[in-house]
Image (cartoon, grey):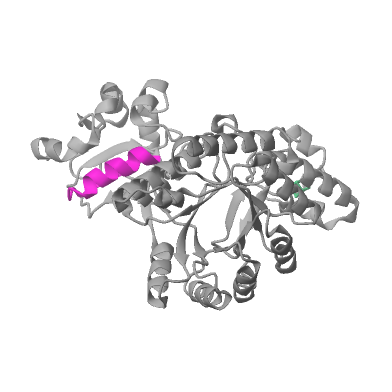
Amino acid sequence: KINSPLEAYKYLPQTNCGECGQPTCMAFASTLIDRSGKTTDCPPLIKEKKFAKKLAELDRLLAPEIRQVTIGVGERAANIGGDDVLYRHKLTFFNKTKMFFDVADNMDEAAIVERVKKISDYKKFYVGRNLLLDGVAIRAASNDPAKFATAVKKVIENTELPVILCSFNPAVLKAGLEVAKGKNPLLYAANKDNWKEVGELALEYNVPVVVSAFNDLDGLKTLAKTFAEAGIKDIVLDPGTYPTGKGLKDTFTNFLKIRRAGIMGDTEIAYPIMAMPLTAWMAGIADPVSASYWETVLASIFTIRYGDIMLLHSMEPYATMPEVHLAETIYTDPRSPVAVDSKMYKVGNPTADSPVLFTTNFALTYYTVESDLASNGIDCWLLAVNTDGIGVEAAAAGGQLTADKVKDAFEKSGFDLKSDVTHNSVVIPGLAARLQGDIEDKLNVKVMVGPMDSGRLPGWMEKNWPP
Ligand code: SF4
């Protein structure tokens, strides 16, 4: 296993030709290690026959401990697995947990279409990006191949999202596969009773497949090993998700054991894991709000430890919002804080008389301030100062937010406090009050210290603006 750019460099052509977009082969080697680049980005390595052996070896050495499996095709294809570490702070977790929501083939067609559209159209804006749902799991509740095929057709006609075909009946799965040809669906699932037929289907249609053994890790490993030996590479593990009590404790332990073994080098079980928070609906909870709540609790547990893909049911906002937020948070790269571009932003329709404020380019800070201003109808200019994505208080203490940095940010933005506004003043965050004197000296402007919390900006503006 390769862990450093120097080791990866040995396998590169070492000509520094620049065709990969990097100035040197060593710089390119760094992108391989942090996975921002792929070996296919180096044309000489790919094209020249003399490098073929090195390329194969490099690909093998760079492969993640946990196999990456792709479900679906095109832009919305879902990659799962691909991790190298047990703890996020050791590197980062790759491939955010993918959330698939169920439809059943015994729903009427209009209801299927409506639900599929709801899943596909889901969008939650969060710190500068839209959080989305990832796919549709089609359950063969009817156990009827024809009925299942009709439902699969309806789903794939109405979404670009990847799908999971769910049945333990090989005839039903085959009917779904025929309709979903070319869509690379995930087959759910092979178990101890049907593994031979389902394995043949996975090979025949060349699709990823789930192997399932509830609370039986030896059985699960045996199935995965058998499939791998048969030539099936894209395997997902389902150790069962028990929703409550000792079963839930066992489930949690199973997830830990599987992932630990995979990361520690047991290749026979180094595959992505599937969790099924929708089993909350089978836990005998009568009230749907409570079932949704419990489903969200299960989703949260297995987002943190180590569900790579999930089957979910509740689409209530109080269920989906915490689920997508948590996955986004756990899977952000701890090596690079989420940041917005450092520049001058317009909030509303500012004029030359509108206030000028600044905050840092840490996305969470920026969007909080921007939303507090915009939602209160405060038209203004808001500068995001580059603090390497660090929030105001920490940046002011750590030297990433200084009067020089603020001056630099104004200059780079092209915004001139003397000519672009009439008041030659700037409102600084209360948490950066210590910079008031320095900024006054460096920018030669009137500095007004705003509130400690941007939520108080509307009240502060009423009292203090215009200056
Ligand atoms: Fe080196 Fe390949 Fe990049 Fe050329 S394209 S600089 S050979 S890594």
Q: Is residue 315 left or right of residue 202?
A: left
Seen at 91% across and 51% down, the residue is 50
Q: Is residue 127 left or right of residue 240?
A: left
- Residue 185 position (above or below residue 347): below
Residue 11 pos. (x, y %):
82, 41
Residue 339 pos. (x, y %):
43, 41
Residue 347 pos. (x, y %):
26, 50
Seen at 59% across and 72% down, the residue is 176
User: Where does the N terminus fall, quadrant-wise?
Assistant: top right
The answer to whether residue 254 is magenta is no
Number of numbered discs visible in the structure rendering = 0
Foreground residue among 163 and 403: 163
- Residue 288 position (above or below residue 372): below
The answer to whether residue 124 shows anywhere in this view is yes
Foreground residue among 426 and 130: 130
The answer to whether residue 374 is magenta is yes
Q: Is residue 119 left or right of residue 448?
A: right
Foreground residue among 456 and 3: 3
Q: Residue furthest left?
A: 463
Seen at 33% across and 55% down, the residue is 316
- Residue 244 placement: quadrant: top left
Residue 117 pos. (x, y %):
40, 68
The answer to whether residue 270 shows anywhere in this view is no
- Residue 370 placement: quadrant: top left
- Which residues make up the magenta segment? 363-383
User: Where does the C terminus fall, quadrant-wise?
Assistant: top left
